[in-house]
């Protein structure tokens, strides 16, 4: 194609020739913005005073693009764009359905909150090591993973976000961080390798990597091919990413080591990418295999949520406690996947969105508690209620929210999940969800009692004057914003429930996803061949 | 490695390799070559220069920090994709122009911009790794 001589090739059979509407570019906008601003941050790496402004404006633009995309999808249904003008099974397709757009939106909110929190939490050394470029590139990877419609491309975005997260994890290169990062990197690479193996098997069988294409071909290949094996491989790989029970040990080993804002972002974003991938694979692609694996997923879900909450009870370090709560929440989402019903999936997606916001906020809160107590150990904590009453209020809201108590955002998804379990007679699943809620309440109640209610055990109260850098407006602002979001969703959940209900019904009819990528299947195949005949004449 | 022969040859070798890397980059669209391999050749040119004269002359010679060059490459690649927005074609579609220059037709395209971006990303990241490793060896 490197000459201007006109070709007599009928492009219609291979390419999209109608110009896409301007709004469809919103599918790639968050990703493109993330990369442009990440690159700008990388170029101004030495200019650490100007870098935060570039990064924050990039994060704001990304969030605006996410909001635009969400709105567009909400109004007009699934948006599809195939890279390089190729027709879907050949080009890499980006598909924003309600699930992807919602996750991308919440990721954008959490990312912006993290960027603002980091203004005061990440010092000059951290910035010089490249906090902001890593943050933007990781967020681009996360967002693109939510929006891609190509399974190998999903693998690529997993790698992008992993590389970004490695950078964030070792920021500062302390001994403890390197220890945590080694475990994290090794186990994540194993999971990614399994994921890649499964993709390779799948490509060998289907001859395509486009998820919509796989979805429509799966029915025909079910009798001959080892689809169940592939589905089980995906389940293992993504369960490891999501930190589900037997393969969750990497999370408590690494999440408490980096800077608190990094922990918060990881807790909010990374495990949820695994959950998203599970939802996508098992509902859009392998719905029959999901039915067969539902029992296994349910057992994994129960073990993950109950053992996660028990792990949280046993911790003394607030950050480690939160790490176990992240795991426990993953169990909730898996329960929804195991149920696979309209109510169950709606609850799972709602819980994922709630968990992204609240877990990040909890880590931010832990950062502020740790700053005021000069450490994260609960047995040395105390006296915060009298010193910073407003922080106690925020803590109480977030603690109630994470335990699923009214009137905050954790209540509704749990109610949905319990109802969905009882609908199919799975009383033990409903019981474990409620038991987990109780155990979580005890774990966070203990934290509240120790850190806030108890009298300070220290004689010298030196913490008021020291460290004026942290706990300023940016830190408090991002924490309060996330908390208010949780409160608002808890008090007025109808719009969110409408959205998650729509996501659940979209997921349960995988045909809608396929139809969006391959619109009007029959005429598309018929017409080009007719044109080709004319061209040859 | 600071022998007289090596130090005499290194500047010529490095400049030749950089020239060659640009050649490899530009022929890459239709023939073997491209941004990735071009970037690797350019990075090895700087590595040779660094082995001969030490790391700081290299850092002075390229003016910018290698990671900044990497960022520039990423920016170019992203821009190559975004250009498609203004022509009403999907993201990352290859766009071509054919200006005539001295009677020769030049084929310029967004894949070329993307490839130059790849060149800089590879060049910057490999150079920064190589320079860091050479620096450690001296200590």
Image: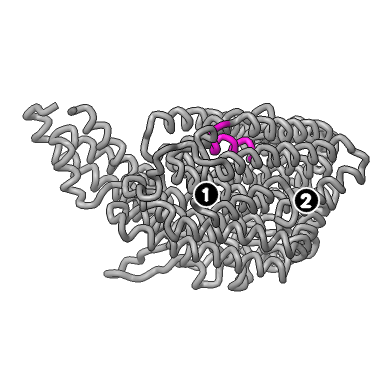
Residue named by callout 2: A347
Nearer the N terminus, badge 1 or badge 2? 2
Q: Is residue A313 above or below residue A339?
A: above
Q: Is residue A262 left or right of residue A518?
A: left
| Magenta segment includes A422 | no
Q: Name the spot of residue A7 as percent of width and height, x first.
A: 54, 65
Q: Name the spot of residue A337 as percent of width and height, x first.
A: 78, 43
| Principal secondary structure, stretch drawn in magenta | helix
Residue A32 visible to the viewer = no
Q: Name the spot of residue A79 as percent of width and height, x first.
A: 67, 64
Q: Is residue A409 left or right of residue A178?
A: right
- Report the residue at 56% width, 45% height from top: A452
- Res. A272 mark: none
Task: Tell me the element at label 2.
Answer: helix
- Report the residue at 36% width, 48% height from top: A467
Task: Tell me the element at label 1.
Answer: helix
| Magenta segment includes A323 | yes
Residue named by callout 1: A364
Mark 2, Cα crowd under 10 Å, few <14 / some 14-19 / many 20+, is: many
Quick one: quadrant of the C terminus of chain A? bottom right
The boundaries of the magenta stretch are A316-325
Residue A277 visible to the viewer = yes
Q: Chain of mark 1?
A: A
- Report the residue at 67% width, 38% height from top: A203
């Amino acid at each position: 194609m490197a000459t201007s001589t006109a070709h007599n090739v009928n492009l219609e059979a291979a390419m999209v020739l109608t110009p896409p509407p301007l709004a469809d570019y919103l599918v790639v906008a968050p990703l493109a913005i993330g990369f442009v601003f990440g690159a700008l941050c990388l170029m101004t790496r030495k200019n650490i005073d100007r870098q935060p402004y570039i990064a924050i404006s990039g994060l704001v633009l990304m969030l605006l693009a996410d909001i635009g995309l969400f709105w567009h999808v909400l109004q007009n249904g699934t948006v599809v764009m195939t890279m390089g003008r190729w027709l879907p099974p050949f080009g890499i397709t980006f598909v924003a359905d309600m699930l992807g757009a919602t996750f991308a939106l919440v990721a954008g909110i959490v990312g912006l909150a993290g960027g603002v929190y980091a203004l005061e939490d990440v010092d000059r050394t951290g910035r010089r090591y490249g906090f902001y470029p890593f943050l933007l590139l990781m967020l681009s990877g996360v967002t693109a993973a939510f929006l891609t419609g190509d399974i190998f491309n999903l693998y690529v975005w997993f790698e992008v976000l992993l590389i970004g997260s490695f950078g964030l994890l070792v920021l500062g290169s302390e001994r403890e961080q390197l220890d945590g990062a080694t475990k994290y990197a090794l186990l994540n690479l194993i999971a990614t390798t399994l994921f890649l193996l499964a993709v390779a098997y799948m490509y060998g069988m289907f001859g395509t990597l486009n998820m919509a294409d796989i979805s429509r071909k799966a029915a025909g290949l079910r009798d001959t091919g080892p689809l169940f094996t592939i589905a089980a491989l995906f389940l293992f790989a993504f369960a490891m990413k999501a930190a589900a029970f037997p393969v969750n040990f990497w999370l408590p080993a690494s999440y408490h080591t980096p800077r608190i804002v990094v922990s918060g972002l990881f807790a909010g974003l990374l495990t949820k990418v695994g959950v998203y991938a599970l939802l996508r694979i098992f509902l859009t692609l392998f719905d029959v295999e999901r039915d067969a694996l539902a029992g296994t997923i349910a057992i994994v879900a129960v073990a993950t949520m109950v053992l996660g909450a028990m792990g949280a009870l046993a911790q003394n370090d607030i950050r480690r406690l939160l790490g176990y709560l992240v795991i426990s929440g993953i169990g909730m989402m898996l329960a929804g996947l195991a149920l696979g019903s309209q109510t169950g999936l709606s609850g799972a997606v709602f819980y994922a969105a709630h968990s992204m916001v609240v877990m990040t906020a909890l880590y931010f809160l832990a950062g502020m508690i740790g700053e005021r107590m000069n450490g994260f150990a609960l047995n040395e904590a105390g006296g915060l209620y009298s010193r910073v009453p407003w922080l106690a209020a925020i803590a109480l809201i977030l603690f109630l929210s994470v335990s699923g108590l009214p009137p905050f955002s954790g209540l509704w998804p749990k109610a949905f999940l319990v109802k969905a379990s009882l609908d199919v007679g799975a009383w033990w699943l409903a019981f474990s969800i409620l038991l987990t809620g109780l155990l979580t309440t005890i774990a966070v109640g203990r934290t509240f009692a120790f850190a806030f209610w108890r009298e300070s055990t220290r004689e010298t109260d030196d913490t008021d004057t020291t460290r004026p850098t942290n706990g300023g407006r940016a830190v408090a602002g991002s924490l309060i914003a996330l908390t208010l979001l949780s409160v608002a969703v808890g008090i007025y959940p109808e719009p969110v429930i409408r959205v998650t209900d729509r996501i659940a019904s979209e997921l349960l009819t995988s045909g809608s996803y396929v139809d969006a990528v391959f619109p009007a299947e029959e005429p598309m195949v018929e017409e080009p061949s007719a044109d080709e005949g004319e061209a040859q004449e | 490695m600071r022998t007289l022969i090596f130090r005499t040859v290194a500047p010529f070798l490095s400049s030749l390799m950089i020239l060659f890397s640009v050649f490899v980059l530009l022929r890459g669209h239709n023939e073997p070559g491209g941004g990735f391999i071009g970037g690797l050749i350019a990075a090895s040119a700087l590595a040779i220069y660094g082995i001969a004269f030490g790391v700081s002359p290299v850092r002075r010679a390229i003016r910018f920090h290698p990671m900044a060059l990497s960022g520039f490459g990423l920016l170019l690649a992203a821009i190559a994709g975004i250009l498609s927005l203004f022509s009403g074609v999907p993201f990352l579609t290859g766009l071509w122009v054919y200006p005539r220059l001295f009677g020769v037709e030049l084929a310029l395209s967004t894949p070329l911009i993307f490839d130059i971006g790849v060149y800089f990303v590879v060049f910057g990241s490999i150079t920064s790794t190589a320079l860091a490793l050479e620096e450690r060896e001296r200590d």
